[in-house]
Image: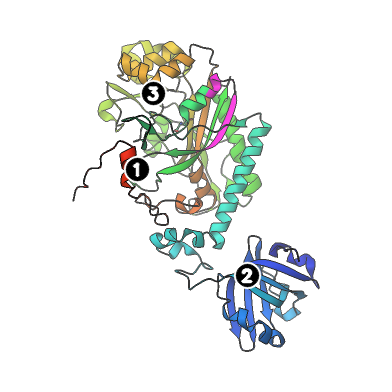
Amino acid sequence: MERTYIGDAGAHVGETILFKGWIDVRRDQGKLVFFDFRDMTGYIQGVILPNRAAEMAEAVKDARPESVVAVEGIINKRPERNVQADKQNGDIELEITALTILNKAEPLPFEINVDTKEVGEESRLKHRYLDLRSARMQRNMRKRDEVQKYVRDFLHDQKFIEVETPILTKSTPEGARDYVVPSRLYPNHFYALPQSPQQYKQLLMTGGVERYFQFAKCMRDEDGRGDRQPEFTQLDMEMSFVDREAVMQMNEALLINIVQKLFPEKKIQEIPFPRISYKDAMEQYGNDRPDIRNDKEDPNSLAFCWVIDFPFFESTSKSDNPDAQGEWTYTHNPFSRPIEEHMSNLMNKEAVGSILTTQYDIVLNGFEIGGGSIRNHSFEALSKVFELLGHSVETIESDFGHMLQAFKLGTPPHGGIAWGFDRLMMLLLNEPNIREVMAFPKTGEGKDPMMSAPSTISEKQVEELHIVLKKPKQ
Ligand code: ASP
């Protein structure tokens, strides 16, 4: 018999069908044994009637919650008094005629048919595959996929293509520490994992792609501060021949569509999204990601705003950028272009501190959910920025030579943005942290208790990588 999905059960009243899935709950009531069965499409109640108890006794003995089963039976309408109108399949019931245990579950480390948020993080992540079966985690994964599909379709309709960029690459100046990977073939040389695909996406513009996007994994080696993860997902985009307005409008339209189509219960406070200058945000809210919600109690209120007109440079004495070396460091992205009126100030020592960049950040309910800029695609102007940032001629050549070279070989004007996709999903799903919207996150301390990562490696591996391990400090 072919498998029927539980979500389609209502269309099969009176028929004998076969379900495959999990036992969600088991209730023994005297001579009757009730089960709630679950598959990826939902839940249904089943019952073993006393006249069949003997033939199924063996299987029933092992039918513990979370065991995987194949179950055959007849779909019956429930008598009026037993109908549970608020439940999926609450008007029908499966009269079980055969039960096969495909994989028996031992007693569980924690209950998963309740909200698992209360379970200790270490245990939840150690058994993440169990946690993922819970209703809330299933909703989160499926909703995330719906949004990703929506985004992909929306952007493809606008002539974007998705291009994958490398994970093994070279350090990029995103302002955090890199994760590095030792090279076996080239002793004492290292790859870096990308903090973002920034340089690649710009070089794709040189490569004639014109409209690029990617759900990109980004890796930043930061201390486990707040709600950070060593790796996270960006919705990364770059477009050729656009100005700031075009990028902002396209992104605003996409965000509005996602909310209206996929989260109709949510209400966007103001459309078009208000725009606030960095200066006003700092003066009025004391930060550059203002929470402008009128009603902070309402979980369905979404207050988007743009923050623009950021200063390009700040004095290194005020910065926490680990790469800062000269008198000035960049505030967001060294590849950004100053606003047009301030382009010439790059050449004017006195005016450097007052240059505004084309950077735009998108903020939702007090969280920065994305940021980007129009890029500096002129060879001379970008060289000048690196010089102002205190790089020597040699490091400009070794670290950014490929970008500068590309900008001498026909690079169109371009700009883009990246969304912190996990953070956006967290806010849309009313979750308290980004771990709830990732399938396999790390703990707050950057560990994966399920895989036991990070872990030691074999002596042979160490040897091959030409590295020598130090004894850890006690
Ligand atoms: N690459 C930048 C970031 O990760 C975003 C951008 O400017 O597109 O913050």
Q: Which quarter of the figure is the N terminus placed in?
A: bottom right
Camera-side mark, 2 or 1 = 1
User: Residue 193: image x %, image y %?
Assistant: 41, 35
| Residue name at image x 63 percent, y 38 percent | 152
Gap between marks 2 and 1 measured at Cα: 42 Å
- Which element is circle 2 on? strand
User: What amino acid type is highlighted by mark number 1?
Assistant: Gln
84 or 177: nearer the viewer: 177
Q: Is residue 152 left or right of residue 217?
A: right
Gap between marks 1 and 3 measured at Cα: 44 Å
230 or 21: nearer the viewer: 21
Residue for badge 2: 69
Crowd class of label 2 (few under 14; some 14 to 19; many from 20; radius 10 Å): many
Query: Is any part of residue 361 visible from this angle?
Result: no
Among the two numbered marks 1 and 3 on one chain, the one whose residue lies closer to the N terminus: 3
Camera-side mark, 1 or 3 = 1
User: Residue 226: image x %, image y %?
Assistant: 36, 48
| Residue name at image x 33 percent, y 37 percent | 465
In the drawing, what numbered circle is on residue 312?
3
User: Residue 353: image x %, image y %?
Assistant: 33, 20
Residue for badge 1: 461
**Height in image: 110 above or below 228?**
below
- Which element is circle 3 on? loop
Q: Quadrant of residue 122?
A: bottom left
Q: Which residues are magenta?
A: 204-216
Crowd class of label 3 (few under 14; some 14 to 19; many from 20; radius 10 Å): many
User: What amino acid type is highlighted by mark number 3?
Assistant: Phe
Gap between marks 2 and 3 measured at Cα: 60 Å
User: Residue 69: image x %, image y %?
Assistant: 63, 70
